[in-house]
Image (tube, rainbow, N blue to C red):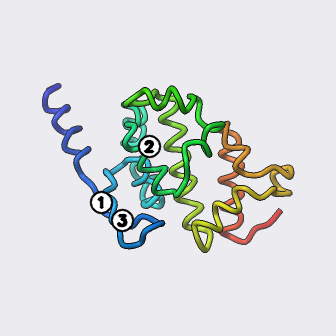
Amino acid sequence: MALRAKSEITTRKQISAKSRVPKKGSTLVRHIKFSPSWVVVHSKDAPKFKMELIERIREGVKKSDWKQLIQFTDSTEKEFEHILPASISSMQKKTVYGKETSERIYELAKLFGLGYEVFDSRDDFKKWLRTPSKTLGNKMPFELLDSSFGFEMVENEIVRIQYNVYS
């Protein structure tokens, strides 16, 4: 029974999808199904797969998946330094991250997926993250991403923008 379950997990991990990297439109990147970068691309699908994502968080995000997410969002590790519960130097030493760090990575992926869906361009979304918002207490949305409540507030604000409901 345990052997069968392990082979099913291995099989699921090998499933992948292709999508374009934002920087170089002609380069294809393989996103392993349910990886953080897959969640960005398939943000509408992700809620259907919450149980699988919970399992991925428990197993831990691989360093390679984290690096792919950074590349896909056209970001740097330094930008996420204050958001992640582990230091960049300790993350560079690990091959698989702990539960708390993995959860935060998936939260980021989900948020970026929603933001990319709502804003006209990825650059517009990243600019919005760095612009103080009156509805968020004149804080930059990016500053609030170091807590789950902050994530919730930023996500709610993006949904308000999506439906043209301004406070």
Label 3 neighbour load within 10 Å: few <14, some 14-19, many 20+: some
Q: Quadrant of the C terminus?
A: bottom right
What residue is drawn where x is 61% and y is 74%? 120
Expressed as whole percent of the image width and height from the top left, the position of residue 21 reads 42, 64
On screen, residue 54 versus residue 116, left or right, reads left
What residue is drawn where x is 77% and y is 51%? 140
Expressed as whole percent of the image width and height from the top left, the position of residue 133 reads 81, 57
* Of callouts 1 and 2, the N-terminal one: 1
The amino acid type found where label 3 is placed reads Ser
Provide the secondary structure element on which disc 3 rests: strand
On screen, residue 164 versus residue 114, left or right, reads right
According to the picture, the residue beneath numbered tag 3 turns out to be 19
Expressed as whole percent of the image width and height from the top left, the position of residue 18 reads 31, 63
Q: How many marks?
A: 3
The amino acid type found where label 1 is placed reads Ala
Label 2 neighbour load within 10 Å: few <14, some 14-19, many 20+: many
Expressed as whole percent of the image width and height from the top left, the position of residue 85 reads 59, 30
Label 1 near label 3: C-beta < 8 Å? yes
According to the picture, the residue beneath numbered tag 1 turns out to be 17
According to the picture, the residue beneath numbered tag 2 turns out to be 66
Q: Is residue 22 above or below residue 55?
A: below
Provide the secondary structure element on which disc 1 rests: strand
What residue is drawn where x is 38% and y is 30%? 96
User: Whole-Å distance between the Cαs marked 2 and 3?
Assistant: 16 Å
